[in-house]
Amino acid sequence: VKPDNDPKVTGSINDQNGHGTVVAGCAGAVTNNARGVASTGFNCRIIPIKVGSDNSAVRGLLRGYEAITYAADLGAQIINCSWGGAGIDPGAQDVIDYATSKGSLVIAASGNDGLNNDSYLQSPASLDGVLSVGSCNGSDRASGFTNYGMNVDVYAPGENILSTYQPNQYRGLSGTSFSSPLVSGIAGLIKAARPTWTPEMIAAQLRGTVDMMQGVTADNRRLYWGRVNALRAVTTNASFTSGDRTPGLMLAGVSIDGQAGGRITDFDKTSVKFTLKNVLSDASNVQVTVTVLDGMVKLHTGASVSMGTIARNGQATGTIDLELDDNWPWYNSNVRVSLSISSGSYVNHEVLFIPVDLPTQNSFTMLYQSGSAAWNLVDIADDGTVYSAGTVFGQRGMLRVSGASGGFLPLPFTPSIVRAISSTSVYLGGNNAGRATVSRSVNGGQSWSSVDVSTFVSSVAGLHIFDSQTGVVVGNPVSGKLGLARSTNGGNSWVAIAGTPPALTGETVPAGAIAAHGDAMWLATSSGRVFFSLNKGQSWSQGSTGLGNVSVISLAFRDSTNGLMLYRTSASGPFRIATTLNGGLNWKAGTVDINTAMKITPVRLLANPGHHLLACSNGELYASDNNGTDWQTVLSRPVAGVLSAAANVVGRPVVVFSGEEVGIIQYRYAGPNGSKLPAFTLSEVNFGMVDMGQSRSRTATLRNNGASDLTVNKVEIIPEGATPSSAFIITTLPKTTVPASGTVTYPLRFVAPDTGTFRAKLRVTTDGTPSVVEMQLLATVQVPTSVSEDLARMGS
């Protein structure tokens, strides 16, 4: 990996370390010489900069962003980056800004994961100022492997692209790596024809002269903008006053409530002003169609904004008003607003990213964020250790995160269940070589001991560990009985459970359709039946659901009696939630289509003490303290492609999400339907003996002993007897919300008006029980002495 200042590869050549030669041929192979291939960059010169290792065993790039800076310093007018990786590095944006300031247009491959780059951000492709290129095939359809999205600017052929290959041969390869240099070559032609044009103008010209691709409609065009047209890109706008011309309209700036760096900080209506600029030919009758891309956001202004005429190098502004819905899920994210810009036959599309920064006590941490991952199982131990199983780039594995450390571990088989016990102890359940198996590790997943449980279950659908010795495995039926087995020796062996209920014909247990609380456990079947045990799985009884054959997704109990079931009436039916108030003995079917009513796709029901949780496909999290009748938002941050989730209390309540990413939120929730119990911590505040004409300060503390947040509606002092209203005062009114188990302190001051004893009551009115609480205030005033009472008390 040592720099050698030599772009040539030493040693054997393969598709990895020969990649740059193929890319260079796409952009700059000699054209019109009746030999080999023709590139798009006729007579463009290539600066070959090697950023990887000659050793094919060394994966990844070593000096990608340094190479961009180096190329810009050398005067490269077009910089092609047929490489990238997941995520956004703020330092990388500085590199792009530097290159642009030097007159370089950076063009980058969008990636080959088949993902939407609007949620699966790539660097450098997703960075501001980079022209991102996706791949299409010879039929002008987007390639199946290409990353796509609103921040993929243009497309170019990327399938079986014949190009130069070492040593002295030609080979056809596929990928956005080869789409990008084709566009870079065209960009070079534009620069050659228009040497005074800026990077911004070249990018606008490429995007404004594309051909619409096959299979693309007006509704999804912003995701698949168009395939570059080299002829139009080079010939259009030869003059800005005559001939074939097109505007270059783009977003120039955004202000929120009058602030250039503003953000949405509450649920009130917010005014957003956007500015468009035109870098190419004059644009008349500019119209902008506004579409809010995120649910749970209201657009108060009209969907159409008229911008008039925007001359070349001119600007114009438009204004829209937005308001977050009460169930908006993110405390730190962006509201995305689509701007479809038109002027005659010209169209362009821009996206406003409007920052949201809502106050919260919750905190979110991303544990894993990379491409091509599918973490379909996750659990969190009592000590906070997270175990997640799935695939990364198609390879089976486990992610383990404990405190500040984490890493990847091999798996003995593909599991269907993961149960986290501690930083050292974890269980797996699944099929190993066609046999239902439970495995345990006592060293944090470094090694595993496995037990065949196929005598009791034909597949493992659920696993719960009650304590260090006792566990229950649940699965599909064996020999006409539900799949159940129990261990009383820490999973070393499993035995059948006496009286295991018989199974119905074709009945199965869906993976994850189990729940546990204390010594109780529940399981649901594909026939809509629910069974429960109150003694750590030793015996089982059947509840009554009346749901019929339904697709059960998950169960959750917030205590021993209150439970919820997330289900669908068919594989594609609406999501509904059934409820039980008696420990699963009887269930009431759900009537609300959760997906439609809440504008979400639920993934799993969870529970922490006192409340249920609904984890959703983008990392949205909602909580309920009244068995799903009402749901409140638990403000979090997005997680891409959520497939599973788990809850626990690790100091604070936590939920971990897994999917394309793995993230964890520590949250605070006190639902509105729990108890609100205000009480002063003392019955009286005595200001003691005060000299006449002096004052003294004290405090009074109100505690909320309930499970829900308490709202303070009024705070007042009620004088008693001859006490004047000015004797006792509240110096500052504190917050009006008292969290569950929290306190609020009232600063008080007594001003001695005359000699004697003075009394009053501090009265606080809330929405709690009782609604009014009072505290006695008392002070005695004496004739001044030579030494103040306050000074005499110092040191006591």
Image: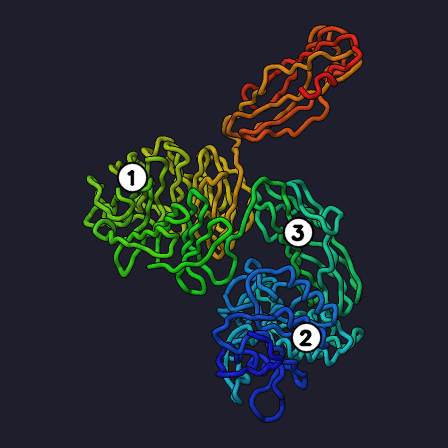
Q: Which label belongs to residue 587? A: none
Q: Secondary structure beneath disc 3?
A: strand
Q: How many marks?
A: 3
- Name the one closer to the observer, 27 or 296: 27
Query: Measured from the top left, where is residue 88 in percent x and y?
Result: 60, 60
Which quadrant of the structure image shows residue 694? top right
Residue at x 61% of width, y 82% of height: 6
Query: Measured from the top left, where is residue 791 in percent x and y?
Result: 74, 18
Q: Which label belongs to residue 531? A: 1
The amino acid at mark 1 is Phe
Residue 319 in view: no
Q: CA distance from mark 2 to mark 1?
A: 67 Å
Q: Earlier in the sequence, mark 3 or mark 2?
A: 2
Q: Is residue 677 above or below residue 724?
A: below
Residue at x 65% of width, y 58% of height: 351
Q: CA distance from mark 1 to mark 3?
A: 48 Å
Which quadrant of the structure image shows residue 687? top right
Residue under label 3: 354
Query: Measured from the top left, where is residue 338 in percent x and y?
Result: 64, 56
The amino acid at mark 3 is Ile
Query: Measured from the top left, where is residue 399 in percent x and y?
Result: 44, 56
Residue 586 in view: yes
Q: Secondary structure beneath disc 1?
A: strand
The amino acid at mark 2 is Ala
Q: Secondary structure beneath disc 2?
A: helix
Q: Are marks 1 and 3 in contact (CB under 8 Å)?
A: no
Q: Which label belongs to residue 71? A: 2
